[in-house]
C-alpha cells in the first residue's frame, strides 16, 4: 500500500451462494480524491461499500482504510469513515444543530453549538435551517447535515450511495459543492452511482464496474462529451 492512501482495496473478491459478486477488485484513493464507482444494477457497487464498512468480509484480498486493516479491525477502520446512505436518517424531533451534536457524540466527539454552526455552514446548510427540526428537511438538506457529521467526526473517507437520485438540479449542484468542500479538506470521497452525467463534473476519477469486475477507469478531467456518451452507451446502458 502507498503510505498516504486513504482507501486501498487490493484484489478483493466475494461470492454469494457460489456466485462472484466482486472478482479481484482493486481500488486506491488518495486524500481529497473524488471517485465515482459506476455500474448497472447488480454490478457490485453496494457490495463494495458494505465491504469497506466492514459489514461484509471478503473471501480474498485486503481492505485498508487510513492505514487500518478493515478486515481484521472493521470497528477501528469505521472510525475513519462517514457513510451517507441514499436517505440520511436524522432524528426528526431534533434541530440540525442538535442532530449534529448528537451524531458527533455517538462518534465520540463532543462539539459545542458554535462549532456545530460552523460545520453546518461549511457543509452548505443555510443559517435559517440550523435551528429547525429535521422532520421537514429535503434530501439535499439531510445530506448537508450528513456531511457536517462527517466533518465533525474527522472522517478521512466519505462514502455516498446513490447521492444524486431524487435530487433536483439545484440540490444536485449543492451536493457537488459539498463534495468539493470535503475534498478540499483532504477527505477522500467514494460515490456509488448510476448517474454518470451528473457525477462527471465532481469526480476526479470514474470507475466502471460490471459483473463485479472493474472494466474501465478514466480520469474525469480528460474525458470529452462524445467519449462520455460512448462510455455510457457501451458500458452502462443495459
Ligand atoms: N447478501 C447477498 N446475498 C446474496 N446475493 C447478494 C447479496 N448482496 C448482493 N448480492 C448479489 O451480488 C451482486 C452485486 O449486488 P450489489 O447490490 O452489490 O450491486 P449494485 O451494483 O449495488 O446494484 P444496484 O445498483 O442495483 O444497487 C448481485 O448479483 C446481487 O444479487
Image (cartoon, rainbow, N blue to C red):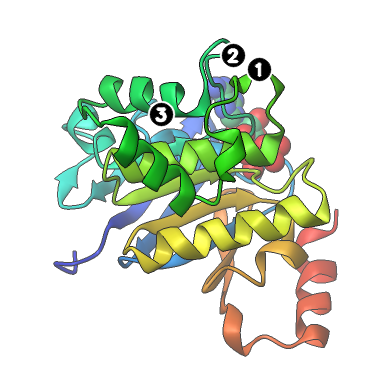
Q: Which mark is residue 100?
A: 3
Quadrant in the picture for residue 92: top right
Q: Secondary structure at mark 2?
A: loop
- Which residue position holds label 2? 92
7 versus 162 height, above or below: below
The answer for how far apart the CA atoms under marks 1 and 2 are is 4 Å
Asked if marks 1 and 2 touch (Cβ < 8 Å), the reply is yes
Question: Counting residues from the N terminus, which is met first, the one under dot 1 or under dot 2?
Answer: 2
Q: Secondary structure at mark 1?
A: helix
Quadrant in the picture for residue 225: bottom right
Front residue of 117/226: it is 117
The answer for how far apart the CA atoms under marks 1 and 3 are is 14 Å
Question: Counting residues from the N terminus, which is met first, the one under dot 1 or under dot 3?
Answer: 3
Q: Which mark is residue 125?
A: none
Front residue of 7/214: it is 7
Quadrant where the N terminus sits is: bottom left
- Which residue position holds label 1? 135
In this rendering, does residue 123 appear at all? yes
Q: Secondary structure at mark 3?
A: helix
Front residue of 171/213: it is 171
Residue ID at (39%, 68%): 184
| Disc 2 residue lies near ligand 1 with CB under 8 A | no
Amino acid at each position: 500500500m502507498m503510505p498516504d492512501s486513504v482507501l486501498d482495496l487490493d484484489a478483493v473478491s466475494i461470492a454469494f451462494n457460489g456466485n462472484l459478486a466482486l472478482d479481484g477488485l482493486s481500488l486506491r484513493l488518495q486524500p481529497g480524491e473524488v471517485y465515482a464507482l459506476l455500474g448497472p444494477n447488480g454490478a457490485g457497487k453496494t457490495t463494495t461499500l458494505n465491504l469497506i464498512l466492514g459489514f461484509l468480509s471478503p473471501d480474498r484480498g485486503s481492505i485498508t482504510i487510513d492505514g487500518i486493516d478493515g478486515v481484521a479491525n472493521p470497528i477501528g477502520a469505521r472510525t475513519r469513515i462517514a457513510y451517507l446512505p441514499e436517505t440520511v436518517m436524522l432524528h426528526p424531533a431534533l434541530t440540525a444543530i442538535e442532530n449534529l451534536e448528537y451524531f458527533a457524540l455517538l462518534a465520540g466527539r463532543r462539539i459545542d453549538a458554535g462549532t456545530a454552526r460552523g460545520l453546518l455552514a461549511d457543509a452548505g446548510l443555510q443559517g435559517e435551517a440550523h435551528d429547525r427540526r429535521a422532520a421537514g428537511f429535503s434530501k439535499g438538506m439531510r445530506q448537508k447535515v450528513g456531511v457536517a457529521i462527517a466533518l465533525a467526526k474527522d472522517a478521512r473517507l466519505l462514502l455516498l450511495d446513490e447521492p444524486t437520485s431524487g435530487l433536483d438540479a439545484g440540490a444536485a449542484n449543492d451536493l457537488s459543492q459539498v463534495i468539493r468542500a470535503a475534498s478540499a479538506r483532504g477527505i477522500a470521497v467514494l460515490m456509488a452511482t448510476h448517474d454518470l452525467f451528473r457525477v462527471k463534473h465532481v469526480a476526479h476519477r470514474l470507475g466502471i464496474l460490471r459483473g463485479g469486475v472493474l472494466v474501465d477507469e478514466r480520469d474525469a478531467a480528460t474525458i470529452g462529451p462524445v467519449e462520455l456518451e460512448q462510455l455510457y452507451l457501451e458500458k452502462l446502458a443495459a
